[in-house]
Image (spheres, rainbow, N blue to C red):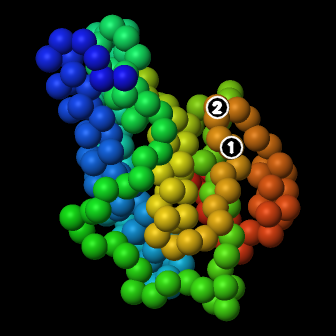
Amino acid sequence: MISGTATNRAEIRRLTSWFDEQFYANVVAPLMHERMLKRILHRSTPDGATLREAMKSANQLMDYVDWLLDHRNWLAGATLSLADLAAAAPATPPTPSVEIRPSITPSPSAGLRTVVIDPGHGGEELGAQGPRGTLEKDITLAVSKRLRTLIESRLGLRVFLTREDDRTVSPDDRLALASNHRADLFHRAGREE
């Protein structure tokens, strides 16, 4: 997964690190902190400016991915590499430079055990589209998968997504999934409609 010339290997490592560190630090961590930790644990209002900045970063990062794919067959060159897998799969988040650990850890006695995250859109529902063709449905799915990893690893909660891939899920099916898993919290990712 890390092959080719020294230059190719360096590019694969650079992009893998970029997805695991930059995407996390500039998109996932602020969204997780504002939309989940503040709401659930601290019962405070998310900061709109921070949310807008995180989504702006997400759009810029996805525009860069668009540019890479316009100029290459795969993210790091002519063949599939670790960089492509890092972009597609949620990774265990690095230790962030900004402390986002909650001041309290939810326990079963606190009543919060199961979270369902709805990435929204999917399939024929594209959501917003960036100037270079970046689709909201792709960003919200990637962020939701990383958010699931963070909540499971940091808070020890069970987390389910209403969709794991690019498909349409009806509003009734989304709510039924939350009900079937006895969700204590249903979180809608992306913009509110």
Which residue is located at x 50 percent, y 84 percent? 105
Percent position of residue 53, x then y: 30, 54
Q: Of 46 and 164, which appears nearest the observer?
A: 164
Marks 1 and 2 close (CB-CB < 8 Å): yes
Residue 128 visible here: no
- Whether residue 12 sits left or right of residue 27 in the image: it is left
Quarter of the image for residue 33 reads bottom left
Q: Compared with residue 137, is residue 94 higher up or lower down, i.e. above or below?
A: below
Q: Compute the Cα span from label 1 to label 2.
A: 8 Å
Percent position of residue 77, x then y: 29, 13
Percent position of residue 49, x then y: 31, 63
Which residue is located at x 68 percent, y 27 percent? 124
Which residue is located at x 34 percent, y 28 percent? 83
Q: Compared with residue 164, is residue 83 higher up or lower down, i.e. above or below?
A: above
Residue 77 visible here: yes
Q: In this figure, which residue is indicated by the disc labeled 1?
A: 163
Q: Label 1 amino acid?
A: Arg
Q: In this figure, which residue is indicated by the disc labeled 2?
A: 166
Q: Secondary structure at mark 2?
A: loop
Q: Compared with residue 35, is residue 19 higher up or lower down, i.e. above or below?
A: above
Q: Compared with residue 143, is residue 70 higher up or lower down, i.e. above or below?
A: above
How many residues crowd mark 1 within 10 Å: few (<14), some (14–19), many (20+)? Answer: many
